[in-house]
Amino acid sequence: MSDTPVSVPSGSAASVPDPSGLVVVAARPAVARARRRPPVGVLVAAGWLLVVLLTALILPLLPGCDPLRGDFTHPSAAPGPGHWFGTDANGRDLLYRTAAGARASFAVAALTVAVGLLVGGALGVAAGWFGGWTDRVIGFAADLLMSVPTLILVMIVVSLRGPGLPLIGCLIGAFTVPAFMRISRASVLSLTERGFVQAARMIGTSPLRILRREIVPHMAPVAVTFAFTATTIAIVAEGALSFLGFSLPPPAPTWGGIIAEGRTTLGSAPWISMVPATVLCLTVLAFNYLGEHLRSGAPTARTESTR
């Protein structure tokens, strides 16, 4: 094979000879830059979540945007100027109520992820690192918790203690602990066999330092990726609980509660239920899409080989 240098014009692609017999195709800079750009779907999903979050945080604080104030001259008004998403049977603006309802869903989701990630992650690290009876006890507790019907137990506890977003978020988060624990445990078991962990052990690094510097940073991306799935679980669960009347009591706005209020007027005013239901579905879809994109990953380079 000739070792003559190959001149490659700027911005073009060429096959560069390699001593191993492989031919590596150098990608054009423009193509490489395009591959670094996130897909359009990711941008749309992230944009939607950003709009919903900012609307939930800002809109209820603006003057005249009270989600509890009713316009009794326009009950069950169709979407249009003045009430862009329409009004409910009491004349309350659905845009304001849907934005305020997002606060409840995001608050429950944040608590759920925090409880699942912290408790489940810690238990998974302990089970994977120590093994033995520690692994068996934690695994049995996780299996036991997974066998409990989640929504039924949450409804029983809420009936006894009274509704509240912190209680609901912690309860739903407790049922995501087994999933976070299994993911963290699998990551730890895989990482302990890696060369950099074995090398750290051989030079006498303390277990706590290995966990803090080598294990946790490498397993964190996997756990954070699953947090998107846990977020969708929490939003759907909170919506179901509020629909059944086990979340914030009326007239406090929640997505499930607004949907339940519009059940009796689906024939004459379907927008009362459809507006929050559509926002809920699109929000869950956006979280799922982003989580799936993070799980699958995106290739940053392309190599072709021939003999």
Image (spheres, helix red, strand yellow):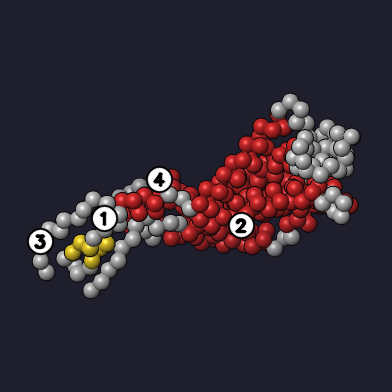
Three-letter amino acid code of the residue under disc 1:
Ser
Question: Distance of mark 4 from mark 1, alpha carbons?
Answer: 42 Å
* Viewer-nearest of discs 3 and 2: 3
Q: Residue at x 71, y 39 (%)?
A: 99
Q: Say which residue label 2 marks.
A: 178
Q: Residue 21 location in percent, x, y?
A: 19, 69
Q: Which mark is residue 12?
A: 1
Q: Quadrant of the N terminus?
A: bottom left
Q: Residue 111 location in percent, x, y?
A: 65, 43
* Viewer-nearest of discs 2 and 1: 1
Does the residue at mark 1 contact the one at mark 3 (Cβ under 8 Å)? no
Question: Distance of mark 1 from mark 3, alpha carbons?
Answer: 19 Å
Q: Is residue 205 left or right of residue 70?
A: left
Q: Residue at x 84, y 49 (%)?
A: 269
Q: Which mark is residue 31?
A: none
Question: Distance of mark 3 from mark 2, alpha carbons?
Answer: 60 Å
